Image: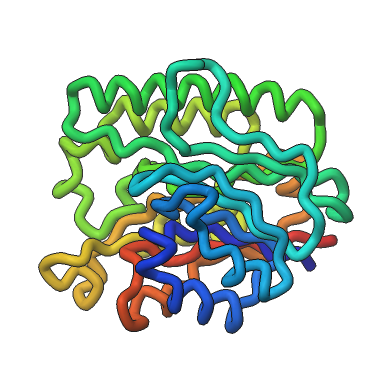
Amino acid sequence: MLRIATFNINGIKARAAVLARWLDESAPDVAVLQEIKSTDEGFPRDLIEGRGYQLETHGQKGFNGVAILSKQPLTDVRRGLPGDDEDTQARWIEARVEGAGGLTVCGLYLPNGNPAPGPKFDYKLAWMERMQARVTELLARECPLVLAGDYNVIPQPSDAARPEAWRDDALFRPESRAAFRRLQALGLYDAIRLRHPESASAPPGPFTFWDYQAGARARNDGIRIDHLLLSPHAADRLRDAWVEDAPRDWEKPSDHTPAWIALAA
């Protein structure tokens, strides 16, 4: 079984203890991280490599930044989402996981887009269009593909404890949700909804993000914005998927918590 997780760490240096504990306790085979908020040179590599992972980063000083770590070799590493040579934000990384049946993993940190409407929202939607184009290219290879990360999109009302509170937010605006559906229409599957279809109509949840303010975690006032989307070849191998919410309650946590999938080898 191959376990793949996504975790917006919200600052690798601020959450080093949280990340180390999570890697020791959960031991994912592959993990993608978002918001590392570190340059490639400044990343604490020993924290990852000392635990037996190969590490590939696409960093940026103080903002954004994504990484892939894997217990199996990573090849064909690509940094940056194609389609805009002037975009310098570090939000996309992809790599092939050797020994995993041709599996490609893409780690992404999709733009937030607030305030909306406005230039930041326009950038978000343009970025999603570029992502759709890249995913179309990757799907044409007809190999297993996992797109894991912080999408900054609440796909459905059941993905928020209080959807009405997010009505005008860029994460829940109709344009963002429509762009997410266009991605899925390429032939991608939301791993948690695929494995647990009952969660779409049950009480809201599971969630992957709770704001630090106003006791959101204690009240379970969360949203699900961290997703793992699977190509058909990857979905055929899906055995389980869920959210691991315990790390949100550790000391000095990220405001996100890991989501994961288990694929047949």
Can see residue 164? yes
Q: Quadrant of the C terminus?
A: bottom right
Which x, y percent locates residue 80? 55, 31
Relative height, residue 112 to residue 16 (above, below): above
How are the residues colored? rainbow
Q: Quadrant of the N terminus?
A: bottom right
Relative height, residue 42 to residue 246 (above, below): above
Residue that protrudes farthest toward the front in the picture: 41
Can see residue 228? no
Residue at the spot 77% in from the left edge and 50% down from the top edge:
74
Q: Is residue 145 left or right of residue 129?
A: right
- Judging depth in this view, the residue of 81 and 112 nearest the camera is 81
Which x, y percent locates residue 14? 35, 68
Which x, y percent locates residue 147? 60, 43
Residue at the spot 36% in from the left edge and 43% down from the top edge:
152
Res. 53 image quadrant:
bottom right
Residue at the spot 19% in from the left edge and 28% down from the top edge:
116
Q: Is residue 182 left or right of residue 175?
A: right
Residue at the spot 53% in from the left edge and 51% down from the top edge:
41
Q: Is residue 69 left or right of residue 259?
A: right
- Judging depth in this view, the residue of 178 and 107 nearest the camera is 107
- Judging depth in this view, the residue of 48 and 132 nearest the camera is 48
Relative height, residue 60 to residue 137 (above, below): below
Relative height, residue 224 to residue 175 (above, below): below
